[in-house]
Amino acid sequence: MACHSKRMVKEENRWNLAVVMESEKATTLEELADSVVYIPLETSDSCLLSNGAYLLYADSCDIFVRSNNCLFHFDANGHYLNKIGKKGMAPGEYARLQSVCVDKENRRLFYFTGNNKGQYWGYTGEFQKEINLQCEGKTFSQCITSGHHIVAEQREYTDKGLKTSIVFFDMDGNFLQEIPLKQDDKVVDISMQTVPLIYAFGDEIKYKDTYSTDLLSFEDKSGRTEWIFDLGEYEPSREYLEDMRKRETLMREMVQLVDIKESLSHFFLLLVHDYRLRGVVLDKESGLLIYSKEMNMPQKGGGMESEEIEGCRFWPSFTDKSHVVYGLAAVSSLPEGGFRAITRHALNHFPLTEESNPVVVKVILKEK
């Protein structure tokens, strides 16, 4: 089943990812893109990013990169502006950072810090306020804001099973609405903490339950199924996902969908099988498989190869409801020829060395 140039993996609203797992298809970055822009990030002692740095958000004005439990703010040309957030126990600090999202309309960031608490930070780095999510007795595992509402996934584990729901709050943390999603009677040894996939797509909130094939949309505060990512025989049950004693079977025999990035025209998926990561690109309109290959973690230089930049690999870490996607390209593994090639294509002239911060890759996808 390998090496088919045009493989249809969509049937009505069902994406057959079991077929994807048995297919190999290579696509270069240039085949997918109308144009590619390289933006080296300024490197200094004030903004030295870790090897695990992650591009959280980018647009025509701002770039936010998460590194070492805080955010680094650059302008659209890669110049360093400021650092946002501080780990600690004092007022205006946080012990841990579970999720971060950008409130573009109000030029601030929402940090979900666990224990039903969140913090607002301004673009210029100032702490604004802390809020409590007002929903008594409930614990939230993942939380983002759409700019109008705060949306959280809530799980209730009892001796009778599991109940999951989506909860809406206003921007001050006041409860608005709860939408029950699923309830079961399976009691398992909860040893592994699973994380759902939840992201903003324009004005919509998209949500992929860890235990379900459905991708839900909450544009109108009522969940509706958008697509179904069907893994067939590879689909793990909740027992395999949560019981540490079954971890070996889970990692070797099952497939986990661990990340979704959605643009106007494509899905970019990351799947894990047999301890290996696979990148998958699907064309939303045609239902065709565009790319399917085993690869390294994107933060470690995994992704699609570039025809123009030797040694460069790309995988998006930020997409929005457009044809533009962004990612970070590590420079530590680039050969000297790759440095020279990026310099020729770069939007700015920051010198690149093995110690440089990663390069932001802005990709304008081909339109139909």
Image: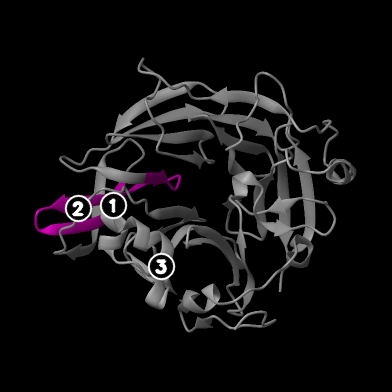
Specify whether residue 209 is in view: no
Specify whether residue 260 is painted magenta. Answer: no
26 vs 107, nearest the viewer: 26
Q: Amino acid at mark 3?
A: Glu
Instruction: Kindly check if marks 1 and 3 are in contact, taking CB atoms under 8 A apart as contact.
Output: no
Q: Nearer the viewer, residue 202 or 12?
A: 12
The answer for how far apart the CA atoms under marks 2 and 3 are is 20 Å
Span highlighted in magenta in the image: 143-168
Q: Residue furthest top?
A: 90
Q: Secondary structure at mark 1?
A: helix
**Residue located beneath label 3 in the image:** 253
Task: Name which of mark 2 and mark 3 comes first in the sequence.
Answer: 2
* Residue located at (41% from left, 67% from top): 253
For disc 1, the neighbor class at 10 Å (few under 14, some 14 to 19, many from 20) is: some
Disc 1 marks a residue whose amino acid type is Met
The residue at the point 36 percent across, 58 percent down is: 248
Structural distance between the alpha carbons of marks 1 and 3: 15 Å
Overall secondary structure of the magenta stretch? strand
The tag earlier along the polypeptide, 1 or 2, is 2
Residue 166 to residue 14: above or below: above
Horizontal and vertical percent position of residue 67: 55, 32
Assess whether mark 2 and mark 1 are in contact (beta carbons under 8 angstroms).
Answer: yes
Secondary structure under badge 3?
helix
Q: Which residue is mark 1?
A: 244
Describe residue 343's horizontal placement relative to residue 196 as left or right. right
Q: Local crowd at mark 2 within 10 Å, few (<14), some, or many (≥20)?
A: few
Instruction: Tell me the residue that label 2 is attached to.
Output: 189
Quarter of the image for the N terminus: give it: bottom right
What residue sits 40% from the left and 72% below the top? 234
